[in-house]
Amino acid sequence: MSLSPIKIIFSSAAIYTAFIGIFINLYQNYLPSFIVNTFLYGKYSLPTSNTTPSIKVPKRWFRHFYVFATIWSSIFLILTSFYYFHVIHSIPKLAKDFLSYFILEDQVATVSAVDTLLALFLITIQSYKRFYETHYVSVFSNAMMDISHYLIGLIHYFGTILAIVVESPGFSQSGKFENSFQFKDISYKEVVISLIFLWAWWNQLKSATILGNLRKNKKGEVVTQEHRIPYGGLFSYVSSPHSMCEIIMYLCLSLILFENHTFHYITAWVLVNQVETSILAHRWYKNKFKEYPKNRKALIPSIF
């Protein structure tokens, strides 16, 4: 099986995250601090000395991911909409030449125009929501993160959008799929999956609001950068509802793009990354707060 650049990048990221994550979960005290802090950031990171070989950037730079993601996803949503609704008759040569670096020469479309456009719409509204959260809801401290986290965040959204289109009609060989969007082709399955996606989308926003409000007064003014125990919403069940919702959304996209094998590499990376993030968060909360709710799980209510 031939691997495209996107598959190679995200399978490598997933394997690396799983491998290092396991070692940190089990043997963190025995690992050099510079290795641990390359992986951990913010409240999870260890104290470092000036001699530690690392390049740090502010954690608030997370906002840059979603500035980029909103622009990048909007470009492809508009481009594919124009093409599938026949506003334009072909994908511009500039776009096809660019995508040729990420598409195998013999790649055939594996998903329909309907599924492609639906997935692009959902990831675009997710990008805009995250832009709103990071700019107007979340309150970032002065915490820092390794530059590798910053770069992989940008690469993630760059690759996610490309993964949706590289196996779609018009961007690869059309195969059995038409280069046309018909509303009658939307199935009940796609409607149900989209509703589940939107449920997770909304609850992720609610979770971000709960976290943001921990650092604000009733007037919405930021009054502290301290960490506190979040209560309410899905926090009643898990320590990382935002991670749980992120996983649900990407699983929904994988179901919509079921025959698109490239996108499953994105979902695998998200799954590994968010599981590890939720484990770290749960462990940190339990160590930080003796009164932390004992019945609250890390990621899956009542189970994990």
Image (cartoon, rainbow, N blue to C red):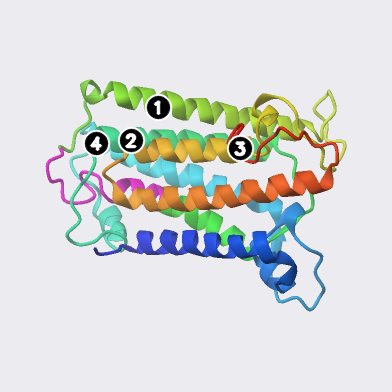
Q: How many residues crowd around disc 4 within 10 Å: few (fewer than 14), some, or many (20 or more)?
A: many
Work out how far the residue at label 2 is from the one at label 3, CA to CA, in angstroms.
21 Å
Residue 113, image x, y percentages: 24, 36
The range drawn in magenta is 160-177
Q: Counting residues from the N terminus, which is met first, the one under dot 2 or under dot 1?
A: 1
* Callout count: 4
Q: Residue at x 62, y 50 (%)?
A: 277
Amino acid carrying label 4: it is Ala
Earlier in the chain: of badge 1 and badge 4, it is 4
Mark seen at residue 113: 4
Determine the secondary structure under disc 3. Answer: helix
Relative placement, left or right, of 274 versus 224 is: left
Residue type for callout 1? Ser
Q: 130 left or right of 185?
A: right
User: Which label belongs to residue 194?
Assistant: 1
Mark sitting on residue 256:
2
Label 3 CA crowd tier, 10 Å (few <14, some 14–19, many 20+)? many
Foreground residue, 99 or 215? 215
Q: How packed is label 2: few (under 14 Cα within 10 Å), some, or many (20 or more)?
A: many
Residue name at image x 64 percent, y 28 percent: 234
The residue under the point 29% across, 46% down is 260
Badge 4 or badge 3: first in the primary sequence: 4
Q: CA distance from mark 3 to mark 1?
A: 18 Å
Q: What x and y, as percent, mark residue 185?
A: 22, 25
Mark 2 or mark 4: whose residue is earlier in sequence: 4
Distance of label 2 from label 4 (alpha carbons): 11 Å
- CA gap, disc 1 to disc 4? 16 Å
Q: Is residue 278 magenta?
A: no
Type of amino acid under label 3: His
